[in-house]
Image: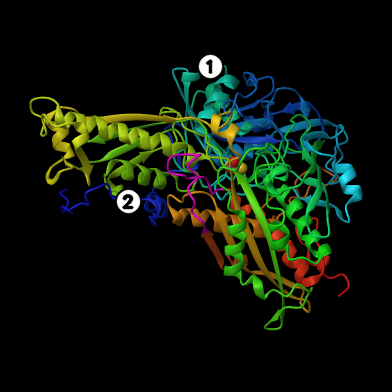
Amino acid sequence: MSRARVPGPPSAPKVLGGKLPRVDGPLKVSGQATYTSDVSLPGMLYAVPVGSTIASGRIVSIDAGAARKLPGVRAVYYRGNLKPFFRSAPAQGFSGMIDERRPPFEDDVVRYYGQYVAVAVAQTFEQARAAAEAVRVRYATEKHNVDPQLVADKPLATESERGDPEAAFQSAPVKIDQTYVTPTEVHNPIELHATVAAWEDGKVTLYETSQAVMNHRDVLYQMLGVPKENVRVVSHFLGSGFGGKLWPWGHSILAAGVAREVGAPVKLVVTRQSMFQTVGQRPRTQQRFRVGANRDGKLVSIHHEYLNQTSILDDYTEGCGEATPFLYSVPNLRVASAISRANIGTPTAMRGPGAVPGLFAMESALDELAVALQMDPIELRRRNEPQQDESRKVPFSSRHLLECMQVGAEKFGWARRDPRVGAMKRDGLTLGWGMAACTWGAMRSDAQASVEIGREGTATVTTATQDIGTGTYTVLALVAAEATGIPVEKIDVRLGDTVLPPGPISGGSWATASVIPAVSSAARAAVRSLLTMATSGPSAPFAGAKPGDLQLVNGRVSRKSDPSSDVPLGEVLARANVGAAVGSGQSGTTFGSEEARKYSLHSFGAQFAEVTWQPETARLRVSRFVSVIDAGRMINPKPARNQIEGAVVMGIGMALFEEAHYDRRYGAPINNNLADYIMATNADAPPIDVTFLDYPDKVLNELGARGVGEIGLAGTAAAITSAVYHATGVRVRELPVRIEDLLVGG
Ligand code: MOS
């Protein structure tokens, strides 16, 4: 197809910072995007695991006789008739990460309800499910613990300390000493976790719901006991993950092992019910937060002591103290933590792990302090703005928290706030206005990328990171377009496959910041290669010119001094008898890096919530939200805004609805479905006003981009509960807010 020639500007078109819709959008809305559970292979069988029906004890016997006789059933596997799996070695950096380290069937001990004890394999999903239900397991039951009251398993370990926080707290004229509780929250991406495993000649391809294909391979080859190069992991599209799909879980190893044993491809899709126990959750936290201040609002002491629940075997730590040491200026501080064990599935990272529950505690305590001081909460924070990261005594690479609060206050109309409880009304409703600050780390990890410029005037970008629904395909197309001068619609981005150049996890909000430098340097290398071909060799169109005298604009090569001298890039390649101009690029991690030693790397933001409260009907709504985010340069503001909006909706869920309950009798997650586990829906989402300050953070990468996947959830719940306090006078310290919390005192 020939394209109309559009005269290009003399330099590369500036495509960044625009509003490009997702390049993968049409594939998704037309149903052509293939998700893991859509993968169907010839001869494929279905596996359905059997989950234990006790939370603690031992397996005495497994009787699969009846199950094996059912129609279509090919096999039933359990400990003893399936080749055992190895454990993987402890992670190095972000390679080898796995939260539940015990492989399925390693021993006969049951440590949580729903733990895999067997797996049925059949020709259809229905047959496999019937067989799984027909497996008879006898247990020796022991006492389990799913108590919501957390108890430290050992004395609290200090994470960060300075000054003398105890003495400073004792002598502080104004004190807050409260305990904040956040519940177990379950990632509920629309897409169920799934694995399709296919072996051929001792090599396995795993179609995975994975936020980290490289890590998945690095774990699975060890657990399967095969060479690393024999495992390929593919994840082209993800129906979201929120952290739950970062690291491998038991079902993936089971699917791979079963497929190897049965000699056919196997599909295993985790049920929604099982997703409440076998693929991680944000654990319950219990945080005592003490803050002491002078009467002018200057903080003198912070103590943050927290516990998080974890499983019997794995020491998952929800790093609630992540933001505490640096967010405000305070001379005396201690953060300390311990874990509390229960018979539950192993927890894992969930959007903004650590900082999100941690900031609920800290920002709630700051709001309580503002009330005690009769001081505006923004003014309190302004008086405690640090000049540097006081925990590490290094400057921030780029921090504009005060401006976030100022811009947010203007957008929200904060100056009109009457601080008296219940004093503000609108349309017969009581209004509550609350705010909170937020922060999330800004990081990069190692990334490699390749860019090929082909004869059709197209460019192909490859890297083994993955797009988890956040817009990575789109951002990389934009970056490659910017660096090559090839129109964005002619750029093909290929992600989510371990055969591609190694790329980062889609987590920690750092995929974009990590991959951009690698892709732009690969793109520049490919352009250099092309321009060199344009100048060298007898049939080169610009023979004798220097590559530096040429430019590539809109897919055409020309002299910078004479843009009308242009030839299509395909002609340059054809005359050189080369298929494609190839460039590769890489970028390095900030973990342990020079810039991370010299700077404190974080994004910041301010969240403003309005709630309406109708005491007559006990109706509470979040009616308005303003979020101002300082996350560096926005490469593509449209999906970036989507990230913040989605995170704010998730924050409304965290504040008002979400909580997984474990049945004390059986230890089972009892509201393990989307009817009983309440999440915020569109009807709960108010207008959300998102503003990005757009200060490039050049310490992090050349474009100055940080990440926006997680920060929108940070501080959001505290802004909402502070608004609830302002409306009702009730301070809710244990999430989610329940209507009955608000009915006290009428
Ligand atoms: Mo995020 S919890 O790093 O997917």
Name the one closer to the observer, 330 or 29.
Answer: 330
Residue 223 image point, x, y percent: 60, 21
Name the one closer to the observer, 702 or 442.
Answer: 702
Q: From the viewer's perspective, tell me whether residue 268 is left or right of residue 436.
A: left
Marks 1/2: CA distance? Answer: 47 Å
The mark lying in front, picked from 1 and 2, is 2
Q: Amino acid at mark 1?
A: Val
Residue 433 image point, x, y percent: 70, 69
Residue 46 image point, x, y percent: 54, 35
Q: Residues within 10 Å of mark 2 (few under 14, many from 20)?
A: some
Q: Which mark is residue 14?
A: 2
Residue 555 image point, x, y percent: 21, 43
Circle 1: element type = loop
Q: Which mark is residue 226?
A: 1
Q: Amino acid at mark 2?
A: Lys
Q: Residues within 10 Å of mark 1 (few under 14, many from 20)?
A: some
Circle 2: element type = loop
Q: Quadrant of the C terminus?
A: bottom right
Colour mode?
A: rainbow
Residue 512 vertical placement versus 406 (above, below)? above
Residue 241 belongs to magenta span? no
Name the one closer to the observer, 576 or 579.
Answer: 576
Q: Which residues are magenta?
A: 692-709
Residue 38 vertical placement versus 690 (above, below)? above
